Image: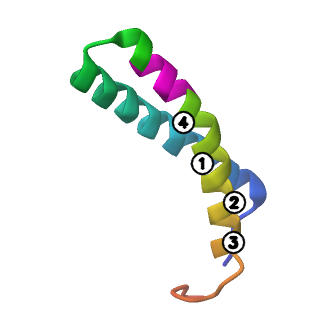
Amino acid sequence: MSETRARSAAKSLSWRVVATLTTILLVLAFTGELSLAVSVGGAEVVAKLVIFYAHERIWDRFDWGEHRG
């Protein structure tokens, strides 16, 4: 049971949308500045998308915790 690279990329993208919106809302709540919130959200989306994709691919190399049918 392993994932294709395309599936890992799609999961990474959908998670980044949710996580980035969360970051933007948190920064907005703490600072009240929309431009700052969007700037922070934009900066973190690129970095975390790449990091999450790499994390998924590394985990895919290990069988630990998987059940094969």
Of badges 4 and 2, the one in the foreground is 4
Q: Residue at x 46, y 33 (%)?
A: 20
Dots 1, 2 in contact, CB < 8 A: no
Q: Amino acid at mark 4?
A: Glu
Query: Which region shows up in magenta?
Result: 37-42
Of badges 1 and 3, the one in the foreground is 3
Dots 2, 3 in contact, CB < 8 A: yes
Q: Secondary structure at mark 2?
A: helix
Q: Amino acid at mark 2?
A: Ala
In the rendered image, residue 29 lying in the magenta stretch gets the answer no
Left or right: 53 as drawn, with respect to 32: right
Q: Main secondary structure of the magenta part?
A: helix
- Give the numbered dot on residue 44: 4
Q: Residue at x 58, y 45 (%)?
A: 48
Mark 3 sits on what residue? 58
Q: Is residue 3 above or below residue 65?
A: above
Mark 2 sits on what residue? 54
In the rendered image, residue 38 lying in the magenta stretch gets the answer yes
Q: Residue at x 43, y 40 (%)?
A: 19
**Crowd band around label 3 with a 10 angstrom C-alpha radius: few (<14), some (14–19), many (20+):** few
Q: Which sits earlier in the primary sequence, circle 4 or circle 1?
A: 1
Q: Residue at x 57, y 35 (%)?
A: 45
Q: Amino acid at mark 3?
A: Ile
Instruction: Identify the colour scheme used.
Output: rainbow
Q: Secondary structure at mark 1?
A: helix
Left or right: 15 as drawn, with respect to 53: left
**Residue 32, x across and y down, in percent:** 25, 14
- Give the numbered dot on residue 12: 1
Q: Amino acid at mark 1?
A: Ser
